Amino acid sequence: MRTLVLIGVLAVAVPARADVGLGLFVGEPTGLDLKIGISPRSGLDLVFGWDTYRDNRDQYGHVTYLATLLVGHGESVNVPLRLGVGAAFYGDRSFSNGTNVAVRVPLELGLRFRTAPVEIYGEIALKLTFVDANNDKDDVDLDGGIGFRIYF
């Protein structure tokens, strides 16, 4: 009986799709984007680059957990809506003045093409700095931009 149950479970099991996407994000921040799928409806997004073109192009990085809230299905594209939470770090070019650390909460809308492993997306993120090495008093910021990813 256990063998039949095991065969039944394996027959209906669907393998998790763990995509890896590599691309570019342009805006605030600007940098290389790596998205690692954890499950079909969640993933980790990593961006490494520059925080802004103001203030001597501060170095920047973030790690964000993205959950797909819903997906619209079109003929040639899927349109995922994602909400995330993560951490960002940024500082001057050499981090010599210290490192700022922030919590970020992005809302992301994508266009994932069905016939090509490409996604174009836009994002807006609330960033709350809780470690401010420079005491800039800009504890709350709104970041955003557009990007693309090629999936492997």
Image (cartoon, grey):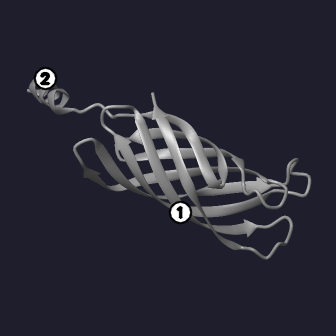
Task: Name the secondary structure under disc 1.
Answer: strand
Residue under the image location 64 percent in, 51 percent down: 62
Quote the CA–CA distance across marks 1 and 2: 50 Å
Q: Determine whether 8 is above or below 70 in the image.
A: above
State the image coordinates of residue 127 (x, y, percent, origin top left).
63, 66
Q: Amino acid at mark 2?
A: Thr
Residue 3 badge: 2
Where on the picture, by quarter, is residue 128? bottom right
State the image coordinates of residue 6 (x, y, percent, origin top left).
17, 27
Residue under the image location 33 percent in, 51 percent down: 79
Where on the picture, by quarter, is residue 46? top right
Count residues near mark 2 (Cα–Cα under 10 Å), then give few for <14, some for 14-19, many for 20+: few
For this rendering, which residue is in front, 4 or 145?
Answer: 145
Q: Amino acid at mark 1?
A: Ile
Compared across the picture, whether 19 is left or right of 25 comes to: left
Mark 1 = which residue?
124
For this rendering, which residue is in front, 69 or 51?
Answer: 51
Mark 1 or mark 2: whose residue is earlier in sequence: 2
Residue under the image location 80 percent in, 53 percent down: 57
